Image (cartoon, rainbow, N blue to C red):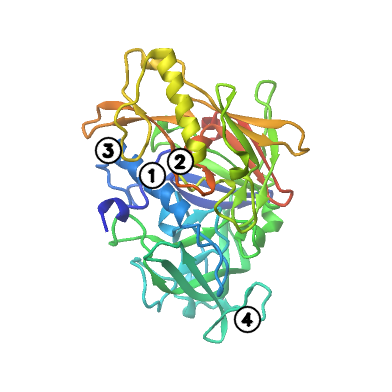
Amino acid sequence: MSNVHKLILFLYPIAISIISLISSSNGLSMRMIPIDSHHLQIVPEKFTTYERLQFFNNITMSRIYNRRKHLFPDGIKSPLSLVQASVYVTQLHLGEGNTAYSPYVILDTGSELTWVQCKGCNPCFELDKNFAYKKSTSFRRVSVNDELCSPPESYKGSCGFSLLYGDIAPLTEAKGLLGRETFHFKNSRTNNMDAYQGLAFGCTLKSKNIQFGTDMHGNVVAGVFGLSSKPKSLLTQLDAQTHGKFFYCIPPAIHVTLIESTIYFGDDAQITGDATRQVQTIPMKSDIHYYLPLSGISVNKKRLPINPSIFEYVEGDLTKGFLIDSGAAFTSLPRSAYNPLRQAIEKFFRDAYGWLPRSPKQAFDLCYSIYPGYYQKLFPNVILHFLSNDQVGEINMVLGKENLFTEVEDGHGVKQGFCLTIITVDDPNHSILGSFQQVNFGFLYDVYNSRLSFVPQNCLENIS
């Protein structure tokens, strides 16, 4: 395996973050801290900008292709992308007394089950410390007759789970017990740790091809934190606090690793606009993933010749649909949708400034040199058209320069050019709205009412 594929978590100051969970009487909130925090030692400090972007490309591609194996005949149906590929982690606090355990886990809105690796696993992935579930006085196995044991799978006499990631060898797999445990979340008002008893999670005892971090030494990432809308998701299990709602606003990268932002849940998840920034709401389908009704794409108000059927949601069909995924770095489009977009952007730069594409960088398909006057030039807008809640007319999301392009540097920090941060995949395939394209928008997921609201916003104002 190449070094490119070994590093599956690395710095992206907008989206890749460590998240600590806090509770309040009005909801839950999650502080987002960049994953290049030195005490974690996950990300090499020597990486160039382009090396980071290349790895973001690998993250996005693996999230695309490892969703494709989405139905399994046995075990819990949880079509996660490769666990190595998510761009957020969170720190959990579970267990009581001397057996309390506080691991970092991947945060994934496209996952149902929260799971951690447990002591006694064989085989295991590299991890500094596993959860000693047998010594925990608050741990309880879930019976195969429990309503959460669906579809039922037995593991040594109690409920088990079996998760497969992807349809490209070598497959990634996690298997083990389904248990209930006390989880602790810090109350932001009292500064105390509040206990939530009996939350179901997975205790992984067998794993294959699971890898976190830059190498397999000193790994601190222990599993996955699931935030889909399904019953085993902690978003659903904690619905008295979350109400099936969460809000986030991803800031731009200009402040690198010195900023924190917040994801809000429940009553704390609020979205506001003003006379110039209107809050817009569109329907949202909650499968394992969150699908949006994309109906077309324009460049500078000119509609592109794309068949809208490739964006239509079809239950169980991951060769179609348009989903929002903050765990993917870049937006991805099937070639039949990407090619008209690329051609329109090329035409804009050629007609307006005489700019021609340069040789593409490996992570991206469309790149340009930084020409004189680059910083003063107008760039094209890409408009995403969504069906509205009442199915009359369309709702538009306008993506500007900061959402579409990124500068690339050589190994000495010298700017070499800029590239389009929308990537292409083979037809047929689903499409993804990634975190680069979500910058400076506030997003409110109202899962129980099947809708997503968004508003243009200076996300630096969301910094706590």
Residue 305 in which image quadrant: top right
Q: Residues within 10 Å of mark 3 (few under 14, many from 20)?
A: some
Amino acid type of the residue tagged 4 in the rendering: Val
Q: For numbered disc 1, what is the local secondary structure?
A: helix
Q: CA distance from mark 1 to mark 2?
A: 7 Å
Q: Residues within 10 Å of mark 2 (few under 14, many from 20)?
A: many
Q: What residue does disc 3 label?
A: 48
Q: Nearer the viewer, residue 96 or 385?
A: 385
Where in the figure is residue 46, as x and y percent of width and height? 24, 42
Residue 217 shown left or right of residue 396 in the figure: left
Q: Which of label 1 and label 4 is nearer to you?
A: 1
Q: What residue does disc 2 label?
A: 330
Residue 304 in which image quadrant: top right
Amino acid type of the residue tagged 2 in the rendering: Phe
Where in the figure is residue 106, as x and y percent of width and height? 46, 56
**Residues at badges 3 and 2 in contact (C-beta under 8 Å)?**
no
Q: Earlier in the sequence, mark 3 or mark 4?
A: 3
Amino acid type of the residue tagged 1 in the rendering: Asn
Q: Earlier in the sequence, mark 1 or mark 2?
A: 1
Q: Nearer the viewer, residue 82 or 427?
A: 427
Q: Which of label 3 and label 1 is nearer to you?
A: 1
Q: Nearer the viewer, residue 125 or 135?
A: 125
